[in-house]
Image (spheres, rainbow, N blue to C red):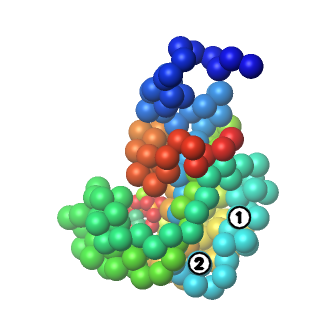
């Protein structure tokens, strides 16, 4: 079957830098080192999938200091920045692309508040997080950041919707 759009042009070029494909939104997720250390990847993924989000890209990696500093660059003047970079590079993480209707807001809901003591019942952070710093998961907060964060860690052929 012929591909839609002009030949020789990739899907990313046809659609532009977007986090929305076929009407479905994509968000970027990280299962953080405190969760991988406690063997919780499957438990977190079960909560993601139960909420109706589809894991369309996933890999377990060690992120470098430079990657962590870029990723959390918006927080570089905050007092917790050094600790945050230390923590995010302290062990394996699982980076993910999640897809679904309203995926960004839905995943923020599934994650719960940044501080687990303030998170709603049955959220990932309420159930699994250790503290505000070691809070088990990251999720993008807006379409622009989702597109940027996905592109930092995934190439187009690693995302299969
Ligand atoms: P994330 O970016 O990781 O999804 O978390 P978030 O949007 O809920 O929170 P954000 O304000 O973006 O903060 C980023 C991460 O920095 C750590 N943090 N530590 N010690 C502290 O007071 C403090 N505040 C924030 C957390 O790991 C938070 O997820
Ligand atoms: Mg954030």
- In the rendered image, the vertical position of residue 83 relative to residue 68, given as above or below: below
- Which of these two is toward me, 97 or 84? 97
Residue under label 1: 45
Residue 52 percent across, percent down from the top left: 76, 49
Residue 35: image tag? 2
Percent across and percent down for residue 72 are 34, 61
**Residue 96 appears anywhere in the view:** yes
Marks counted in the figure total: 2
Q: Position of residue 125 (x, y in %)?
A: 60, 70
Residue depicted at 35% across the width and 66% down the height: 68
Question: With 137 as the anchor, is 161 left or right in this view?
Answer: right
Give me the residue at 66% from left, 72% from top: 41
With respect to residue 69, does 151 lie above or below? Answer: above
**Residue that sits furthest to the bottom in the current view:** 38
Query: What residue appears at the point 39 percent right and 76 percent down from the top-left corner?
Result: 89
Q: Work out how far the residue at label 1 is from the one at label 2, CA to CA, in angstroms.
A: 11 Å
Q: Is residue 117 visible in the rendered structure shown here?
A: no
């Amino acid at each position: 079957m012929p591909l839609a759009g002009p030949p020789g042009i990739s899907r990313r070029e046809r659609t532009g830098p977007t986090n929305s494909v076929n009407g479905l939104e994509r968000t970027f997720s990280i299962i953080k080192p405190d969760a991988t250390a406690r063997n919780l990847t499957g438990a977190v993924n079960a909560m993601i999938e139960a909420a109706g989000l589809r894991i369309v890209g996933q890999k377990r990696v060690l992120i470098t200091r430079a990657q962590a500093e870029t990723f959390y660059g918006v927080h570089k003047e905050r007092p917790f920045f050094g600790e945050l970079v230390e923590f995010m590079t302290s062990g394996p993480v699982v980076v993910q692309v999640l897809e679904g209707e309203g995926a960004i807001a839905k995943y923020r809901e599934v994650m719960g508040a940044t501080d687990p003591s303030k998170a709603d019942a049955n959220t990932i952070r309420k159930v699994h997080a250790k503290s505000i710093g070691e809070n088990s998961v990251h999720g993008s907060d807006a379409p622009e950041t989702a597109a940027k964060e996905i592109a930092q860690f995934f190439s187009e052929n690693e995302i299969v919707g």
